[in-house]
Amino acid sequence: MSTEAQAYFQRGFDAFQQGDFREAVECYTRAIAFQPRVASGYRYRAKAYLAMRDRAKAIADYDTAIRLLPTDAQLLAERAGELLKQKRFDDAALDCNSAMELDPGRADVHAIRAHCHAERGDSTTAFSDYATAIRMDPPNAEQYLARRSKLHTECGNFAAAIEDADLALIANPDFALAFEARAAARQAMGDRAGAMADFAEASARDPHDVAAILQRAMIQVQMRDYAEARDGAERILALSPKMPIALELRAMCDIELRDWDRALVELNDILAADPNRQSAYALRAGLHYRKGDDALAVADQLQVLKRDPESVPCYNQIAWIWATSPDATIRNGTQAIEFATRCCELGHWKEHGHMDTLAAAYAETGDFPKAIHWIEKAIALAEATPATDMPPTTGLADDYRTRLVQYRASTPHRRVSST
């Protein structure tokens, strides 16, 4: 490397170490101008681009560096790791193969390839690569054990997942990712208390572990502990103020806590920032529905349908409003039948709630024989469905029987506002 190139390269390295990534890019660019055939300039500029989250330019620089130095296993490993983050699993696996041909002893490359295989659904090969990485690199085995634990959970091997997480924690008792992996296994097994405890341990050891905080908050939502879940959302937003899923989680908790005005402001802000955020429209539709604003609820559900023309919950909710709204100007039995039928078709006629909506739609048009037919189908299916804790099917069957009495008396169902 020429003297001029070396000087700029050193300045770029110093700037990078100080966190001035733009200056680093500028210095590496000038070094490259003096020595365009030296791979290290492109490699380190790629690192600076990654620090600036400009992944496209980083990959382009890695491509150039590898063309100039195709026998450098480290370059291939670095590009593979970045391709993995970009979910380019096939390309990342190819880089791993090339790196291992050059340097068969790289456990980290086996681990990257294992992740790629897992994402592509080849769990057998992924497990083999993880085993190789664990055997080859005992000092970092906890990293590979934690990742393999998560794969075991995805494959339904919960005992093996917990065993791997336990082994990782024996190696490193403060390893947040291992607590997170064990929490995922316990959650999948239905052990909410154990999962909550492990997610708490993970976030205690790594206060920036957004995934652990989020998963714990999601379990709290399932347990209807909305105040605690909201606190979790606030913790996430303190770390990442614009994270959409955390913003929606907070709004959802506010809806359940009946702080509807605040929830509406939060959802409006989300949609102002991202007018195509489908899930936010769905949440706001649910809020309008609970407030009794049926016209606004339908309008938001139609926004969801624009973005997802096969949204089963959306068809069901709109049909239910058109069939049962207390507001006669909102009700439309004919359209309700059309939407409820489409909902049943998309759901393959397996959901009793969809049949309940179809029955209500027929009742709204005055076709009570069909309303009776479908509500009886809903009752039979609800009674045959294994009970769950959210919501209890026995209570739904009782609601359906109440509506059956109404339909037998030639009376359509009218929803009572929850406000």
Image (cartoon, helix red, strand yellow):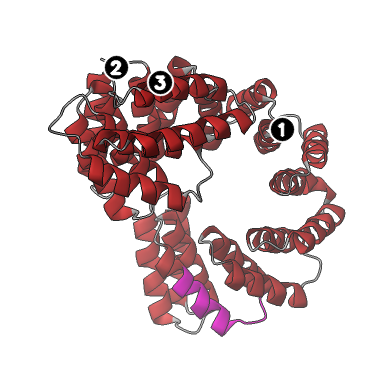
User: Which numbered tag is attached to residue 418?
Assistant: 2
Q: Amino acid at mark 2?
A: Ser
User: Against 256, is 113 above or below?
Assistant: below
Q: Is residue 54 magenta?
A: no
Q: Evaluate whether residue 277 shows in this view.
A: no
Q: Is residue 99 left or right of residue 284?
A: right
Q: Position of residue 78 (x, y in %)?
A: 60, 65
**Quarter-of-image position of residue 414:** top left
The residue nearer to you, when weighing 22 against 107, is 107
Residue depicted at 39% across the width and 55% down the height: 52
Looking at marks 2 and 3 on the same chain, the residue that comes earlier in the sequence is marked by 3
Q: Amino acid at mark 3?
A: Val
Q: Nearer the viewer, mark 2 or mark 1?
A: 2
Q: Is residue 180 left or right of residue 304?
A: right
The residue nearer to you, when weighing 280 against 173, is 280
Q: Nearer the viewer, mark 2 or mark 3?
A: 3
- The residue pinned by badge 3 equals 405
Circle 2 crowding by C-alpha within 10 Å: few under 14, some 14–19, many from 20? few
Q: Amino acid at mark 1?
A: Met
User: Tag 3, which secondary structure?
Assistant: helix
Cβ atoms under marks 2 and 1 closer than 8 Å: no
Give the magenta part as a residue range.
59-72
- The residue pinned by badge 1 equals 189
CA separation in Å, label 3 and label 1: 40 Å
CA separation in Å, label 2 and label 1: 35 Å
Residue at the farthest left position: 329
